Image: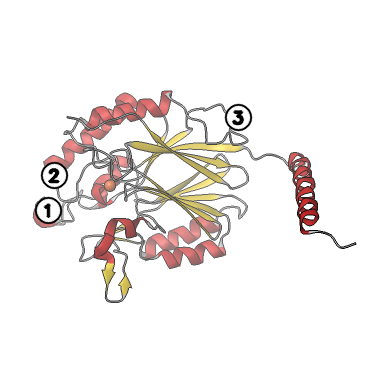
Amino acid sequence: MPISRRDFLLAASAGTCLAATAIPSSANAATPRSRRLRIAHLTDIHLQPELQAARGLATCFAHVQTRPVATSGGVAGDGGDGSPPDLIITGGDTIMDAFEADMARTKLQWELWRKVKADHCGIEMHSVVGNHDVWGWARAKAGTTGDEPLYGKRWVCDEFGRDLPYTSFDRGGWHIVLIDSIFPDEQRYIGRVDEAQWDWLERDLAAIDPATPVILFSHMPILSATPLVVAGPSALGPAGIQVPGKFMHVDGDRFQNLFSRRRNIKACASGHMHLIEQLDYQGVRYLCNGAVSAGWWKGQNRDTDFGYAVVDLFDDGTVERRYVPYGWTAAT
Ligand SMILES: [Fe+2]
């Protein structure tokens, strides 16, 4: 007897239901993922004496430490506990600007950074270097010669207590790499790494257990669509759309090659664009994590509120991110 279309659909529907009811039993048998580390990613702070920025940053630190958030959707392993982060990673552009600033102005901003941090932050912190943290590369404006002992990245490295602008460490079963994205070119700076840092990165990753999941933090995105949004019509050239190297790493293909060789690299988190984005490509999650200063403290930047990202790292190598506005509004 021929089966009618209606009967066929009912049978197919019933089969689907049977299959659907079968899934949870096998899923239940699997071990749920467990959160191993919670990071508060505070990027693009642009701390300055103006615009009540110090009070804004203190408010942000207080929010991070006392207003815990749960990951979205009650992720297994989170337990809905909404616990505070294990550590803070600042994502670069810590101070408003040292790139074009003279020594006195740069000193003032770093002193303010040290004070707000000492007074309001009790959580372990690691920091990425941003373009605005580099002192005096715009020599004419900054009044620098290039011979100053603190010129370029030396000053920010001293502030961060490191010899080099890049570093790595292990926490919660994850390997965390802080990349230095900022290199000079005739356009002032460009997003990439140099050969010395690349050699270091290859050696650093080769030294860890290949089963250890890795997350990279860089100031400029390694891969992102946000530069197309920001560049707008100016990105259109005779050959099509061009992404300016001042927005995003120009050596992304080199990173893609690395990621294809090392499948334990699970995520890349960045700042710089003051926009929020999640992009999944070939097993790597790319997160652009807004800005503490939003539109440089004067208001939102497009749709990005004053905020920070809570990045949860799980034992199965997965990563979840939630952007958290901390309740700041622009000073009037
Ligand atoms: Fe910035």
Of residues 192 and 205, the one nearer the viewer is: 192
List the residue tagged with mark 2: 103
| Numbered disc 2: secondary structure | helix
Instruction: Answer with the quarter of the image where residue 198 lies.
Output: bottom left
N-terminal of the pair, mark 2 or mark 1, is 2
Numbered label attached to residue 282: none
The C terminus: image quadrant: top left
Whole-percent x, y for residue 251 in the image = 39, 65
How many residues crowd around disc 2 within 10 Å: few (fewer than 14), some, or many (20 or more)?
Answer: some
- Does any atom of ligand 1 lie closer than 8 Å to the CB of label 3? no
List the residue tagged with mark 3: 79
Type of amino acid at the residue the image marks with label 2: Met
Whole-percent x, y for residue 298 in the image = 21, 38
Looking at the rendered image, the disc whose residue lies closer to the viewer, 2 or 3, is 3
Q: Is residue 242 above or below residue 6?
A: below
Numbered label attached to residue 144: 1
- Alpha carbon of mark 2 to alpha carbon of mark 1: how far? 8 Å
How many residues crowd around disc 3 within 10 Å: few (fewer than 14), some, or many (20 or more)?
Answer: few
- Alpha carbon of mark 3 to alpha carbon of mark 1: how far? 53 Å
N-terminal of the pair, mark 2 or mark 3, is 3
How many residues crowd around disc 1 within 10 Å: few (fewer than 14), some, or many (20 or more)?
Answer: some
Of residues 69 and 252, the one nearer the viewer is: 69
Residue drawn at x 21%, y 64% is 187
Q: Is residue 95 above or below residue 5?
A: above
| Numbered disc 1: secondary structure | loop
